[in-house]
Amino acid sequence: MIRRILFSLLFLAASVFVIISIYNNKNKVMTPGLPVTPSTPPPTPIPAPTPLVSLGDTPANFISFAPSGQWLAVAQGMKISILDTENFQARASFSIPHEVDYMAVSSDDRYLAIGDQSVLQLRDTSTWEVVFEDPEYVNYAHTSSASPFGFSPNGRLLAYTIDKNEVIHTVLLDISASEVIQRINGYVFSKFDNRGRFIATSSHEWRYGKSRELRESYGRYRTNRFLIWDTETSKQHLLFQLDESRNPNPDFASAKFIDFSADGRFITTNDAFRAFVIWDASTGQEIRQVNLQFYPGALIFSPVENILAYYENEYQNRPLVLWNSESGEILFELPDCSIQSSIVQTQVQFSKDGRLVAAMNFTGQACVWEVHSGKLLTLLEGARGIVWYIGQFSFSPDGKYLVTRGQLWDIESGALVLGPVRTEPSTLIESEPANAPEVGKPVVTAGGSNVNIRRYPNEYCDKVDSLPAGQSIEIVGRNADTSWWQVSIPNGLGWVADWVTTASNIDDGVPVVSTCPNVLGTHQERDEHEKWMFNKINEFRKDNEKQPLDWNEELNRSADWFSGSPYTGCHADSLNNGIDSRVNCFGFPKWATEVLNISSNDSNEGRQKAFHFWMESENHKKELLDDEVEVMGIGHTQSPPNAHDKWWVWVVTLAQAP
């Protein structure tokens, strides 16, 4: 009896302690100005569910809300649907000649601007008829700081970029008159300030006309300038030129990120090297420079206060940082949704009221935090991770929804509200148990936990489905070394790894799925650029007291072919080969690793950019300095002559000697 009473008292005391702890944690106040890591544990990742409202089997490539929040435009390829936000029923639909890559709505909801790679349309939202069209429009906004085009806050102007006679211009369109009233030669549109008087433009990237003479005649061969334009006076207000002396290689001092503070007092830009700068928006004087370990990957001000969000652009996980631009103090470092950078930039956005901030990484995680507490509200798993433009990742006007490149998520519940039926990872297999494999058929079975089904036989490739714990699925093929099984899923085919599953009823009848390219007899001689890269890598290894690498013809053919194969992500080529499978196809018997870069259209400049990029990445440097590798092959290919943008793809494949 006494023991029972004591146990009850202990249980009561523990319960009171837990309640007090919960209350204190709930009402904890975090002091701004101190570098605090929030103690709130991240919630369990949410699998990408079947959307509440289906878009059919075609993924959306863009979703844009009307500022009033009453409707949204959804682009699926060339088709655009206007949906009511109350019930997501269609109000209207129409098509344009090419696939949509960007949309924006004027502040008064009166106009919808639509762009693809070759034309910009302006439509009246009362009739959805085209009221203006410009075939000289080009989309050169390829950073998380820039928009391909945008409306002024008062809805009177539309700013966008055109390519006229191989020279880039930012133009200002008077919407009511359908007339271009101002041109800014040599600069790409980035964004308006909050008042609509000034616009930010930049000379970043290398895409400023096909001839070097034209680029140099406009002073844009070095892409190191930001220009602030006064729309009231039609004159230059400020010009920021990056200090190339701060960069060991001034060719890579590139103007990429710029933003205005909410009150218009400050402007932030990236610096020529690993830093960003805060400028006085009236005088252009430098107020503060913030040095980083790596290049900034995003710079964006809150729309309501002088809080800046940034992260450092590196393949390793880097936290999102909230920073006070007046005091220069870090408010929060938010590591719960680790941002990973790749070929494309990841995204960071504030909600319209500044209460929330969101970030998305390349692997498909999107996180939403409270700005003033640093509390993680939502972790979304299965978001479409590749985001090209700033508008593809955004909040709804009321802050209730988050758009992630053609998906619409409810922030509070984490539910996928709007999306295609089967574009993203889901658990449709689990919801269709009737499709069990026939008895005696070769099957693969998940163990005690769910198993990812990948797009290609590569553990770094994106997930296309999930096999629930304990369930089986029929095998339809295997790769050459039987390390991956090909399986049939409702939306096509996928791959599961052998080492996390159990295969049954396996015999010689399971076919090997060959993905080798039919070019095994080809042989490309090393050109001067590959020899340059070969020597450069060995010089780098020598400087770090590593043995030089020998040339390997099989790796060279593999790298050369891969550099010309359409890139599908996760170092997989257009025939679904991962690194090991690809080098095996070309007769190389061992494992391999590789580094890859997509760089500029000039071959001499491109090879320097590629090498410099690898030198700025700790992960790439580790690959190039690996003690176990002994041989390498190098491939590089230029984009097709008729391509709109020109680039060079560089691939360096490394391995042990066979």
Image (spheres, helix red, strand yellow):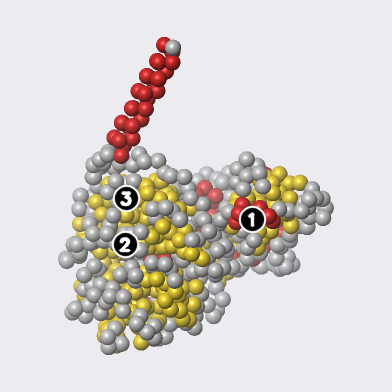
**Any mark on residue 370, and which?**
3
Residue 532 in which image quadrant = bottom right
Q: Which residue lies furthest to the right in this view?
A: 508
Q: Residues within 10 Å of mark 3 (few under 14, many from 20)?
A: some
Label 1 vs label 3, nearer the camera: 1
Task: Residue type at mark 3: give it.
Answer: Glu
Residue 30 in which image quadrant = top left
Task: Residue type at mark 2: give it.
Answer: Asp
- Asked whether disc 2 touches disc 1, contact meaning CB atoms under 8 Å apart, the reply is no
- Asked whether disc 1 touches disc 3, contact meaning CB atoms under 8 Å apart, the reply is no
Q: Nearer the viewer, residue 529 or 19?
A: 19
Q: Where is residue 556 in the image (x, y as percent from the top left)?
A: 65, 61
Q: Does residue 11 appear in the picture of this structure?
A: yes
- The alpha-carbon separation of the residues under discs 3 and 2 comes to 15 Å
Element on which disc 1 rests? loop
Q: Which residue is the site of mark 1?
A: 432
Q: Does residue 577 appear in the picture of this structure?
A: no
Q: Residue furthest front?
A: 1
Q: Where is residue 1 in the image (x, y as percent from the top left)?
A: 44, 12
Q: Nearer the viewer, residue 571 or 97?
A: 97
Residue drawn at 55 percent across, 56 percent down: 425
Task: Residue type at mark 1: give it.
Answer: Glu
Q: Which residue is the site of mark 2?
A: 398
Q: In this view, does 382 lie above or below 148?
A: above
Q: Residue furthest left?
A: 283
Q: Which of 578 and 632 is in front in this view?
A: 578
Q: How crowded is mark 2: few (under 14 residues within 10 Å), some or many (20 or more)?
A: few
Residue drawn at 43 percent across, 68 percent down: 88
- Of callouts 2 and 1, the N-terminal one: 2
Q: Where is residue 557 in the image (x, y as percent from the top left)?
A: 67, 63
Q: Residues within 10 Å of mark 1 (few under 14, many from 20)?
A: few
